[in-house]
Image: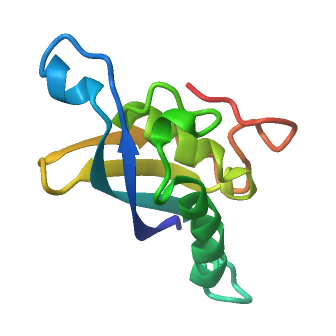
Amino acid sequence: MRFTISQRFFFDAAHTLKREIEAEGSRRIHGHTYHAEVWLSGPRDPQTGMVVDLGLLRRHLDAVREQLDHHLLDDVPGLHPPTLENLCLFIADALPALRESLVRVRVWREALGDGCTLDLPPPPLGEGWGGGTGPAQRP
């Protein structure tokens, strides 16, 4: 059996964006409250009864949040341009210790009603994306 757990967090950040549509407002520094959620999937550990300890997951997400919260996203290393799509990838890449069970990352801006979801293929039970022999193999 495979179980899926999730955890949400939020962060406030500013950014600029070069766009063709809504260009003027996007070029100026402006901010949003972003919400993010990650999903982990895998078997339940028979000893703990958990896929992953949620306390451990929150610890990893706190480290990700620290890199984004109250920052100018344009200046965050590895995140450029600061689009919803790139935020999803940034969060996924910032969780290497959870790579074997990470199956989805979602980032959205509640006030604007927009969001993005990155779906990652679940590894076979007992294996990571790379078959347990190296870095993750992204689709």
Rendered position, 109 above or below 86: below
Residue 6 place in picture, x, y as percent: 44, 68
Residue 135 horizontal side relative to residue 35, left or right:
right
Rendered position, 129 above or below 16: below
135 and 34: which one is in front?
34
The answer to whether any part of residue 106 appears in the image is yes
Residue 39 place in picture, x, y as percent: 46, 60
Residue 69 horizontal side relative to residue 107, left or right:
right
Residue drawn 72% across and 46% down? 128
Residue 84 place in picture, x, y as percent: 35, 37
Q: Residue furthest right?
A: 133
1 and 27: which one is in front?
27
46 and 138: which one is in front?
138
Residue 110 horizontal side relative to residue 9, left or right:
left
Residue 131 horizontal side relative to residue 133, left or right:
left
Rendered position, 62 above or below 104: below
Residue drawn 41% across and 39% down? 118
In the picture, the quarter occupied by the C terminus is: top right
| Image quadrant where residue 59 sits | bottom right
The answer to whether any part of residue 122 appears in the image is no
Residue 103 place in picture, x, y as percent: 51, 49
